[in-house]
Image: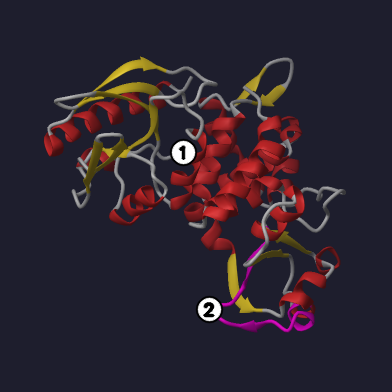
């Protein structure tokens, strides 16, 4: 177990409880700590003057809407009388509104809070970020290069045994940048030597990758947004164009669920033939976004024109669309969850 991470969770919980007491007068305490693979980090009790409530708390650093969607899905199926709770170092005003829209209660170390249960409604926002929330560990695995390496490992776990040269090629990064990422993953127990070197704790690593993808990697891949002729676009053979469907189209073709309204294409090369065939024109509010494909391992022969399921899932989780979150859950259950390794 990552001892630093465990200590960090304890600190976040304690500081959030103290801040809740300061801003609302409400007391909170840990009843029981949870061990993997159980959902949540701790079962907590929140006590008002008239009643006690049980919440299952998940401690997460919240950088983007994707994290909120992840926690919402993780804590979706709880025992009767137990409510979900996100506990974070700090949650911005925009993200607090997203929590409310998804009916996800939260606390942070600043004293911002949203609690929603029968007979209990609390909403505090606008408290400034405390200094203690700024002291967050920095990991090589979550740099731009690290994100590409971790993606390759999660999609192709056999690469854990590959040479660094082959891993660099699969992640499309410079050979010299792989070593520090591998060292970080080893130090935190994600890469371990058993009979052979294997990737472990893949559920947690997947969650961390998906939560960081919208800020740490995706903006660097974005090329442009276009308005495309939908019929022409969907009729294209993307594989022949060295391109891949992502997000809504990929999820629809993998799960049979969702009617795509927005289109995401990951592209190798300049894409001019594709743009011409689909009559795509630049439009900042258009229906099609184009991003740079960033992986070098072979595509799935069963779905050669689709991005790997992990990327489709991450793209859906980065949206604020309820339709997409439901489809993301199906994608996770069918394609990601079965591959997790403790």
Query: Which residue is pictured at 37% across the width and 48% down the height?
Result: 99
Range of residues picked out in magenta = 274-293
Q: Residues within 10 Å of mark 2 (few under 14, many from 20)?
A: few
- Residue hosting label 1: 71
Q: Secondary structure at mark 2?
A: loop
Between the residue at mark 2 and the residue at mark 1, the CA separation in whole angstroms equals 31 Å
The secondary element bearing badge 1 is classed as: helix
Examine the rendered structure and indicate whether residue 144 appears above or below residue 245. Answer: above
Q: Is residue 261 above or below residue 212?
A: below
Question: Can residue 23 be seen in this snapshot?
Answer: yes
Numbered-mark total: 2
Residue on which disc 2 sits: 284
Q: Between 98 and 205, which is closer to the camera in this rendering?
A: 98
Position of residue 210 measured from the top left corner of the image (x, y, whole percent): 54, 45
What residue sits 70% from the left and 60% below the top? 249
Res. 340 image quadrant: top right
Q: Nearer the viewer, residue 290 or 103?
A: 103
Q: Residue at x 49, y 26 (%)?
A: 39
Whether residue 153 appears in this view of the structure is no
Residue 210 located left or right of residue 90? right
Mark 2 vs mark 1: which is more N-terminal?
1
Q: Position of residue 23 (x, y in %)?
A: 14, 39
Q: Nearer the viewer, residue 193 or 128?
A: 128
């Amino acid at each position: 177990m990552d001892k630093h991470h465990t200590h960090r969770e304890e600190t976040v919980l304690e500081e959030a409880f103290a801040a809740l007491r300061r801003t609302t007068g409400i007391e909170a305490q840990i009843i029981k700590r949870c061990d993997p693979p159980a959902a949540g980090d701790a079962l907590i009790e929140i006590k008002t003057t008239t009643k006690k409530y049980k919440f299952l708390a998940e401690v997460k650093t919240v950088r983007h809407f994707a994290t909120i969607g992840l926690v919402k899905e993780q804590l979706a199926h709880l025992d009767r009388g137990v409510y979900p709770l996100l506990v974070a170092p700090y949650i911005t005003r925009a993200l607090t509104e997203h929590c409310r829209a998804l009916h996800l209660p939260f606390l942070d170390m600043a004293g911002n809070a949203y609690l929603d249960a029968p007979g209990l409604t609390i909403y505090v926002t606008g408290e400034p970020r405390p200094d203690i929330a700024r002291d967050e560990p920095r990991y090589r695995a979550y740099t731009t290069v690290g994100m590409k390496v971790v993606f390759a490992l999660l999609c192709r776990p056999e690469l854990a045994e590959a040479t660094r040269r082959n891993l660099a090629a699969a992640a499309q990064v410079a050979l010299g940048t792989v070593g520090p990422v591998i060292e970080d993953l080893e130090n935190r127990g994600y890469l371990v030597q058993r009979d052979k070197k294997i990737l472990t704790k893949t559920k947690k690593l997947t969650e961390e990758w998906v939560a960081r993808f919208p800020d740490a990697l995706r903006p660097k891949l974005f090329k442009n947004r276009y308005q495309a002729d939908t019929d022409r676009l969907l009729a294209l053979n993307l594989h022949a164009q060295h391109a891949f469907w992502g997000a809504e189209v990929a999820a629809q073709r993998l799960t049979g669920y969702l009617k795509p309204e927005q289109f995401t294409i990951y592209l190798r090369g300049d894409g001019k033939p594709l743009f011409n065939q689909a009559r795509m024109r630049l439009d900042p509010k258009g229906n099609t976004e184009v991003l740079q494909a960033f992986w070098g391992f072979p595509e799935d022969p069963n779905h050669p024109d689709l991005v790997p399921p992990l990327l489709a899932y991450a793209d859906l989780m980065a949206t604020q669309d309820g339709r997409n979150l439901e489809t993301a859950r199906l994608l996770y259950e069918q394609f990601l969850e079965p591959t997790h390794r403790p």
